[in-house]
């Protein structure tokens, strides 16, 4: 049986987006970037909402052309381009880079992935992560807690009616970033 893994960067005070939607605060060191490449290379698909997909699609396919790109960024770009991707959006008509747009039926699409034994990383954004959480579709949480207190923005977790009990699988420290890996 496959699984859905929420893969998110989060501030110490629980925000996944800074004020005005900013995302310039994550601290991605070479060691952490290599961890991303190693772990995400084992996934079968990446899942996105429209905004995050468009941000990723504007960067990863051209990362090799950017002079300041690190080796880790280039490795991730080579992983990202061919990776099968689903974008859950009611406003996006088509997408490139081995991507399929899904406008309805999140539960059905996730069920197909899981029955096929696929493991997919859900990158969000915040609205998409909240919807998956409300629907009970997230099997694992891989959160990267960054050494910043944003003081505002959009929190990763919405207010929910019920608790979700999790079990700590592993915690890892990367310089000043802590990776928390939980499972349901």
Image: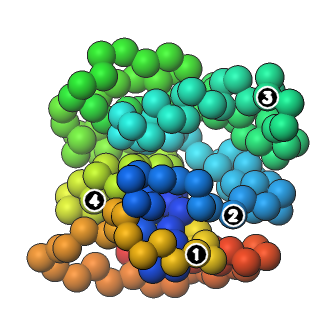
Neighbourhood count class around disc 2 (C-alpha, 10 Å): few under 14, some 14–19, many 20 upward: some
What residue is shown with label 1?
148
Residue 89 shows in this picture = yes
Give yes or no for contact between labels 1 and 2 (Cβ–Cβ under 8 Å). Answer: yes
Q: Residue 156, how many percent across, how many down?
A: 37, 66
Residue 143 in view in this figure: no
**Residue placed under numbered mark 2 in the picture:** 27
Regarding mark 4 in the picture, which secondary structure is present there? Answer: helix
User: Which structural element holds mark 1?
Assistant: loop
Does 114 sit above or below residue 139?
Answer: above
Q: Residue at x 84, y 37 (%)?
A: 68
**113 or 92, which is in the foreground?**
92
| C-alpha span from label 1 to label 2 | 9 Å
First in residue order: circle 2 vs circle 4:
2
Binning the other alpha carbons within 10 Å of mark 3 as few (below 14), some (14 to 19) or many (20 upward) gives few
Give the residue pinned by disc 3: 66
N-term mark: 4 or 3 = 3
Say what secondary structure mark 2 lies in: loop
Can you give x and y, in whole percent of width and height, for residue 11 in the image?
51, 72
Q: Position of residue 29 (x, y in %)?
A: 79, 61
Q: Could you tell me how far apart the alpha carbons at marks 4 and 3 are, in whole angstroms?
A: 33 Å
- Tell me the residue that label 4 is attached to: 130
Label 4 – label 1 distance at C-alpha: 22 Å
């Amino acid at each position: 049986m496959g699984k859905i893994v929420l893969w998110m960067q989060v501030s110490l005070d629980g925000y996944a987006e800074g004020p005005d939607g900013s995302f310039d605060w994550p601290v991605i060191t070479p060691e952490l970037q290599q961890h991303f490449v190693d772990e995400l290379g084992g996934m079968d698909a990446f899942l996105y909402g429209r905004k995050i997909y468009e941000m990723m699609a504007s960067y990863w396919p051209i990362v090799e052309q950017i002079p300041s790109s690190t080796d880790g960024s280039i490795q991730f770009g080579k992983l990202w381009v061919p990776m099968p991707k689903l974008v859950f959006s009611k406003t996006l008509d088509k997408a490139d880079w081995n991507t399929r747009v899904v406008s309805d039926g999140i539960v059905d699409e996730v069920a197909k992935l899981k029955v096929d034994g696929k493991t997919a990383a859900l990158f969000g954004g915040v609205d998409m992560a909240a919807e998956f959480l409300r629907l009970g579709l997230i099997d694992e949480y891989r959160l990267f807690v960054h050494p910043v207190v944003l003081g505002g923005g959009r929190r990763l977790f919405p207010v929910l009616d019920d608790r979700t009990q999790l079990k700590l699988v592993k915690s890892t420290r990367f310089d000043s970033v802590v990776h928390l890996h939980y499972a349901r």
